[in-house]
Image (spheres, rainbow, N blue to C red):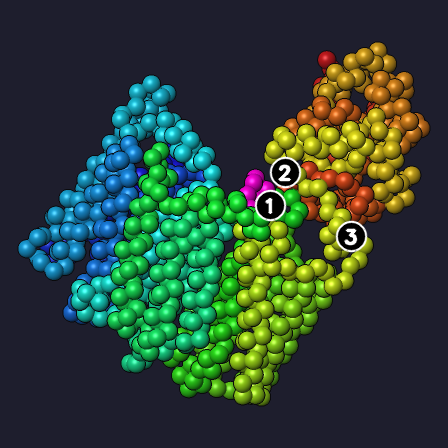
Amino acid sequence: ESLHSCIGLLGISAGSLLVAVHFYSSPRATPLIPSTALGVLLLILSALLAYAGIRRNLRNTSLLMSLCLTLSAFWCGYGVILVLAGQGVLPEPGGSRDALVPGLAALTLALLPVALVGFLCGEPVLALVAAAVSLASAHEVALHYSSSLGPSAVACGHLIVCLVGGYFALGRILCFLTKGKVALPGTDLAEKKAQEQSWGSAGGINPFTAPGLLLNVLSASVFCCRLLGVTHRLFLGHVPWLWAAGTYQIGICVLSYRAMDILMATAFGFMSILQFAAGYCLLYPTWQPEEPSVPTPFLVVFSILFAVLALFLSLQSPVDGLYLLVFVTYCIALACSPRGFFAGGPQGVAMAIFVASSSVALIHLYNARARAKIPTGKGAVKALLARSSLLKLREGPDLHAPYLGYSKYADAKVLAYACSVLAAFALTTPGEPQAPLATVVIPWVVVAGGILKLLGGCVAFARGETLESSAFILYAVMWIIWGLARYGGLCGTARSFHTAVGIVAFMLFNSFIVFCSLFLNMAWFFYSLTFMLIAVSFLLDAIHALPAGYDIAATLVFGLVSFYCFLAALSSSTFEGCCLPMGGPVLQLSGVGAGATKCLHLPARKASSVKRIADILRNGGTCGIPTDTVYVLVAACNRPDAVEKAHRSKRQAQDRPMSLWISSLKQLEPAKHLFPPLLWDFMEAAWPSPISLVIPRGEWVDFLGMKDSAKYVGTPQSVAIRIPDCSVTTHLIDLVGPIVVTSANPTGEADTTHHNQVYAKLGDKVDAVLCGGPSPENIASTVVDCTKIDSGNIGFFRVGIIPKSQVLQILEQVQKK
């Protein structure tokens, strides 16, 4: 935390120093830092600031994170514009001014809430930095319209930032040298971290909401300045602001899924689509004189999706729900204006977005830091629905837990289904073969159907949803390739045979998805099946055999199915119970699609989960658990029925003897006199580790309370025993006692290296799985033959993760002692 805070503040100071030097030297004929060089340096620093902001704890309500991400997005757009100006791309006269002013005006307003909250909540260093950058940006706007102000005023504002950064660096150096005994006011990060954790522990806080809202201020400022006459035209110079906002909002969408906020993550995904579409519209006139046309059906559908999302978001936070209604109005205004983003109506709504975004961002920033909150209506709807027996909001620690195990991401299927609707309705615009770029379709198809659906597929893969992730990724690739080919003019007016062959290959892949979805649920079956209609549309267009009206029919069918899935996923993530059913699996095989035989999956990081697994083992169950190597199937030694069940889970079980695990040699202390001294010393030196020792069977087995279980463990002559080097496993053994262990896979298969594989391989033979994610190793333990250790010789049944030389070295050290 200290490192990331230092990187963030010092990165801001470095960027301000560069800008200050640039403006101090601007009256010279050749500035010390040319525009192109300054732009490249600011782009590098923007990436550094983004890293510093993202690396802060996801549950941390740090004001520095909002400052870093906001400045990073601004410097990204600012840097690109400086590079374009330095290369002479922007038109003159006034090109640089018209390009820079909207972003500078947005930054002036966006940093004021950050500065205000910093002053009110005891963050003077961050407040001074935000206020100084805001003041410098305001001076730079004034400089573009009145040269009498002079560039030194802008440089002075950035110089203040450098001085504050130097003060912070000095404070951190003193704190480090004195080991925390001396700390300048405002630089003690230990105290701040404790405060941030206490503020962030309230639950339900998405720390990335405020930066995402401030990005809307940046994009809306472009159209506000044009409406107010501050800038003279909308052109290429404004595209960096819009696309920087869109790119960062996609990043904040991902981070919101990490913060387990499905609704705001979906909202930021929707907003990013609008930013990229607006940037495309402003970019198009650079190669064609006329303005592009925006498809009306798409915007109508987009407004409906925004309205539905606003309704569900209002159940969580009425203020945020009302805020999304502004975007509903924005989409309607765009649909009603033939000129799209160039018309006055949408630009007027953009002004409302400018004001609303800054206001709601201020509320989120203040409520995340202050103890006395600004009322937002949060909890009012929950209290209202508490009286209803029909609808009940979902809540609890396992609200976002996947079907198997746990995940660091919330479910992204809501966004993926919505993007399917958007991409499908984009097909209703046929486009002009001679001028395919004249219709704004590429942003809807490539960004919504491609990039955001690909994001949803990656999140689904991270949650262990293999089929869903495969389908989303396949469809995303299909939308990107065909969207660029059909609406980007890559294929020209003539389609080739190779294009058709490629589409047929995609259809074959989708046929496999359709077949697999029969084992998932009815909704997914129809979703994947109706996408085949879209693929057929692509194929018919490739061979110039597309019937009139087929695109519209395929769009309506696939769009309606996708919209139903969107509503079902949205309601299931918000309400308890099954509001809109997805249906059961069409086909069921043994262990596949059997929803009634769900195996209990518990996260290993929770002590309560380990306790529940211990209870299951004590009651005669068998469980899959993580270890210091791969996943294993275990049963309690004192439960012969459970040991027999684990033994029978293996094919040819008699050829695969089970091993014995303990948590400490103290469990064998009563039988120490039964072990040769060399063997006992060797066990003390070798454990805990992934080394299994095969030792002679003897009376010591009875001291572990194995009773009737002993016949299933080891062979009549020997037993493999080990103390694992895994705190979760040893804690479980402390609760249960010695356990019997076998590999968590049928005989002859590869080792099980993830908790999702345990139930997939063993099915009903396992009662619960303790989920620890991927195994730390992909190799099993080393098995050492110690039956003849008295003679000073050992053998190896299997050389695993511990090499043979290391085991022999341990033995040699024990013998010398």
466 shown above or below 606? below
Kindly identify the amino acid type of the residue bearing the numbered disc 2.
Pro
Kindly identify the amino acid type of the residue bearing the numbered disc 1.
Ala
Q: Earlier in the sequence, mark 2 or mark 3?
A: 3
Q: Are marks 1 and 2 in contact (CB under 8 Å)?
A: yes
Say whether residue 395 is magenta.
Answer: yes
Q: CA distance from mark 1 to mark 3?
A: 21 Å
566 shown above or below 343? above
Q: Residues within 10 Å of mark 3 (few under 14, many from 20)?
A: some
Magenta extent: 393-399
User: Where does residue 259 sit, x and y in percent of width and height?
Assistant: 48, 45
Residue bearing mark 1? 401
User: Where does residue 543 sit, x and y in percent of width and height?
Assistant: 58, 86
Q: Residue at x 83, y 14 (%)?
A: 671
User: Where does residue 225 sit, x and y in percent of width and height?
Assistant: 22, 63
Residue bearing mark 2? 603
564 shown above or below 150? below
